[in-house]
Image: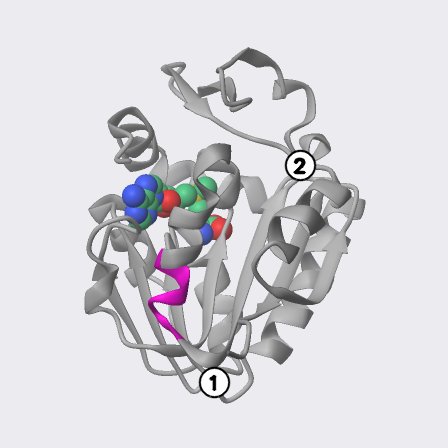
Amino acid sequence: MTDHEMQHYYNLRAPEYEQIYYRDNPDRANELAREAACLLKLANSKQIVELACGTGYWTSVMSDSAAEITASDISYEMLDEARRKNYGCPTRFVKADIYNSIFRLPRADVVVLGFWFSHHPRHQFDLLFDQLESCVRKDGRIWLMDNNPPAEGPENVSVRTDEFGNNYKTRRLDDGREFTIMKNYFSEPELRAIFESRYEIERLYFGEYYWTVALKLPQK
Ligand SMILES: C[S@@+](CC[C@H](N)C(=O)[O-])C[C@H]1O[C@@H](n2cnc3c(N)ncnc32)[C@H](O)[C@@H]1O
């Protein structure tokens, strides 16, 4: 499951990653702000585990209402960026691979995964859901967020698709270096079908630029 090219790409991109959140587009900024407000509400007084936290953008948002956050990422470079920020609640950062080492993380009220679903292979959703469930309490919530193609503007060109329907595109760093990475996009009905196969959807927002979902685990 470990995609070394993707990891290498994100390690190098760490110092420039947050540019994606500050591009000059008021409509996109409004969607982000609205979803940040929803996440803040969901996180209120909760124990949070965040996977693939990157530079801590969403960690920082949640920290204004959460009780405590354990945020993890596979990349030391990303974690270094994240550690530079100030957080509004006790927050610790841990190096962890979503697919291998998250068993060491505590079980949280809410498990948060931002902008990773689109990098996960379409034919292996159950693997990702198993991992997410292993760090959330039975009555907890899973919160996912990702982007739709317009958020990437003209850069959104497919290089190829594989036999499972996974999409690949070229990503360019500020210094011009190029990487080919998996990046999938979903329609709203497609997302509903994927999530409803396993969860109760508490809230699904599908905007022009972004989608977010809050999922409840099935009560057995
Ligand atoms: C698109 S960024 C998302 C960062 C952050 N969640 C956000 O929404 O701003 C993807 C992140 O996944 C991390 N990552 C890549 N492979 C991973 C893995 N196997 N386990 C944990 N994190 C991983 C990268 O280092 C990067 O920080």
Return the disc, 1 or 2, that comes first in the chain's sequence: 1
Q: Is residue 69 magenta?
A: no
**Which residue in the protein does label 2 denote?**
186
Amino acid type at circle 2 is Phe
Q: Which is nearer the eye, 162 or 93? A: 162
Q: CA distance from mark 1 to mark 2?
A: 29 Å
- x and y percentages locating residue 92 in the rendered image: 27, 72
User: Which residue does the numbered mark 1 point to in the structure image?
Assistant: 46
Q: Secondary structure at mark 1?
A: loop
Residue type, label 1: Lys
**Residue 5 to residue 90: above or below:** above
Task: Pick the residue in front: 97 or 220.
Answer: 220
> Residue 108 location in percent, x, y?
39, 78
Tell me the SS state at disc 2.
Answer: loop
Q: Quadrant of the N terminus?
A: top left
Residue 160, image x and y in percent?
A: 53, 10
Q: Residue at x 38, y 48 (%)?
A: 127
* Residue occupying image coordinates x 58% and y 53%: 145
Q: Quadrant of residue 180?
A: top left
What is the magenta range?
Answer: 131-136
Count of numbered circles in the view: 2
**Quadrant assignment, res 3:** top left
Q: Which mark is residue 142?
A: none
Left or right, 109 with reference to 1: right
